[in-house]
Image: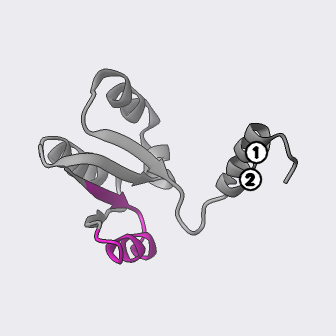
Amino acid sequence: MKFFLISDNIDTLMGLRLVGIEGVVVHTRKDFLEVLQSKMRDSSIAIILVTTKLVDMCPDIISEIKLKQQKPLITEIPDRHGNSKIGETIDGYVSEAIGVKL
């Protein structure tokens, strides 16, 4: 089982290729949905990574897929322009788990 990336920018694609994750760059809703449908039929793909901007193009479809399909797992990832505070979120989990404010 493998990962596959659907990205809206080349930087994210190149970064994940460095760790062996293949993917494509798309810019339109139509192209995104075509690639997504194609990759969902590929039984060798266990996890599809999708950049936030693409998820924001069609949140209704992504939500429906996540609710109704077990495989593949669709995971939203921020790109380099994203404003995700994942580091702060992880710090919060660690602080709560060990009882120390980081």
Residue 92 image label: 1
Depicted 40 relative to depicted 24: above or below: above
Residue 79: say if magenta: no
Residue 84, can we see it?
no
The x, y position of residue 49, in whole percent, is 37, 52
Which residue is the extreme one toward the right?
A: 101
Asked whether, in this view, residue 45 is left or right of residue 91, the answer is: left
Based on the displayed image, in which of its 4 quarters is residue 58 positioned? top left
Residue 88 image label: 2
The quarter of the image holding the C terminus is: bottom right
Residue 15: say if magenta: yes
Depicted 74 relative to depicted 23: above or below: above
Circle 1 SS class: helix
What residue is rendered at 13% in x and 49% in y? 44
What residue is rendered at 28% in x and 71% in y? 20
Based on the displayed image, in which of its 4 quarters is residue 9 positioned? bottom left
Circle 2 SS class: helix
The x, y position of residue 78, in whole percent, is 54, 57
Which residue is the extreme one toward the front?
A: 98
Kind of residue at badge 2: Glu
The x, y position of residue 62, in whole percent, is 38, 35
Residue 21, can we see it?
yes
What residue is rendered at 79% in x and 45% in y? 95
Q: What segment carries the magenta color?
A: 3-20
Contact (Cβ within 8 Å) of mark 1 with mark 2:
yes
Asked whether, in this view, residue 5 is left or right of residue 38, the answer is: right
Based on the displayed image, in which of its 4 quarters is residue 4 positioned? bottom left
